[in-house]
Amino acid sequence: MNDAQILRPSGQQALLIDGKAAAAAITARLGAEVARTGLKPGLAVVLVGADPASQVYVKSKGKMAHACGFHSVQVDLPADVSEEVLLGHVARLNADPAIHGILVQMPLPAHIDPARVIDAISPAKDVDGFHPLNVGRLASGATASALVACTPAGAMVLIEAAAAALGRSLRGMEVVVIGRSNIVGKPMAQLLLQRDMTVTIAHSRTVDLAAVVRRADVVVAAVGRPEMVRGVWLKPGAIVVDVGINRLVGEDGKSRLVGDVAFAETLDHVAAITPVPGGAGPMTIAMLMQNTFEAAKRAS
Ligand code: NAD
């Protein structure tokens, strides 16, 4: 289904891919499904410590779950909680039939091993898609039974929407994913490979990144460096999804969010691009809701 709204502001060539509208359409559809089916998906979000950014993320996840008509639980634990106590909470949520999705907000304090915590989450409730079983299912192409990481899953929806709006098939196209993290770059590459694209993963050791990016019909930037990807690097007619979220503070002390791509430099020659904010960002939480709904459906 193509939920993303594609806008072409006057005076420029590039289509703007509206991730905010796409995310709103997905969550509205999930809310309607909950009302229609009577299914009550349950999402538990575990927050360790009081990191302000994590608190904001966790709050917005809970709010969105509530807006979709889900059962929503937040477990707040002190920053010095032991790994054993945290694992005890995960085990309790694993066993709770009212909970279908469990998310432990990262990053965790240094004394807790994130891999141990992720491994402890039931794969059927791993709505972040970080458990090795879900990672393996995605890598082996068993996406129907996997829960896929939310940010790349959301980016994939936007890429498909842009290709559809442009009347293009993704099959056989060259795509460059910049960044090889476990939460964005690697699962993104797997999803693109499953669309029969020719996938290159670029990273911090890539030689001549500009030349690598230049050959791509589709570019996904997930680096975390403000406006690193310059407009001249991009092939004319490319589809660009900018996952980066970087806060820049201006001389006036005011801060603004920018992506990994120098957005203004791209508008006269790429075919479609996601803005920051309002592009890939809002899709992550929508896909988290979709994963929770899917997990609840499978459990029933
Ligand atoms: P990360 O730091 O784990 O990984 C960054 C990757 O970029 C690494 O694989 C590294 O090899 C690569 N890299 C670093 N410098 C490079 C360079 N000069 N050239 C080429 N590659 C380089 O980051 P992440 O968690 O994957 O996140 C990436 C960006 O996406 C960040 O800005 C983050 O805020 C954003 N993000 C957004 C969402 C969302 O939209 N909800 C979710 C996750 C991440």
Image (spheres, rainbow, N blue to C red):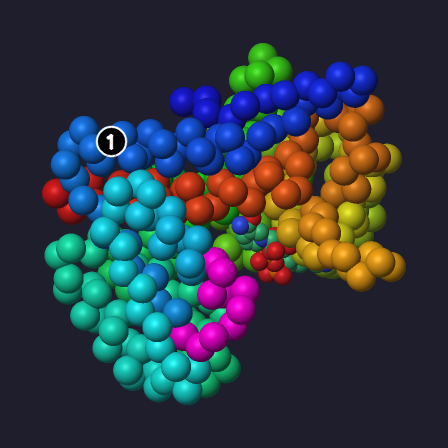
Q: Is residue 4 visible in this depiction of the protein?
A: yes
In this rendering, is residue 85 above or below 135? below
Residue drawn at 16 percent across, 39 percent down = 39
Residue 54 highlighted magenta (yes or no): yes
Q: Is residue 199 visible in this depiction of the protein?
A: no
Q: Amino acid type of disc 1?
A: Glu
In this rendering, is residue 66 above or below 191? below
Q: Position of residue 267 (x, y in %)?
A: 78, 28
Residue 154 highlighted magenta (yes or no): no
Single out the residue that lies furthest toward the top. Answer: 167
Q: Is residue 269 left or right of residue 191?
A: right
The quarter of the picture where the N terminus appears is top left
Please tell me which residue lies in front, 221 or 59. Answer: 59
Please tell me which residue lies in front, 229 or 71. Answer: 71
Residue drawn at 38 percent across, 51 percent down = 63
Q: Is residue 130 left or right of residue 43?
A: right
The quarter of the picture where the C terminus appears is top left
Q: Which residues are magenta?
A: 48-57
Residue drawn at 44 percent across, 34 percent down = 24
Please tell me which residue lies in front, 108 or 25. Answer: 25
Please state the quadrant of the image where ligand 1 appears: bottom right
Q: Is residue 31 left or right of residue 98?
A: right
Q: Quadrant of residue 297?
A: top left
Q: Position of residue 190 (x, y in %)?
A: 49, 42
Q: Position of residue 127 (x, y in %)?
A: 34, 52
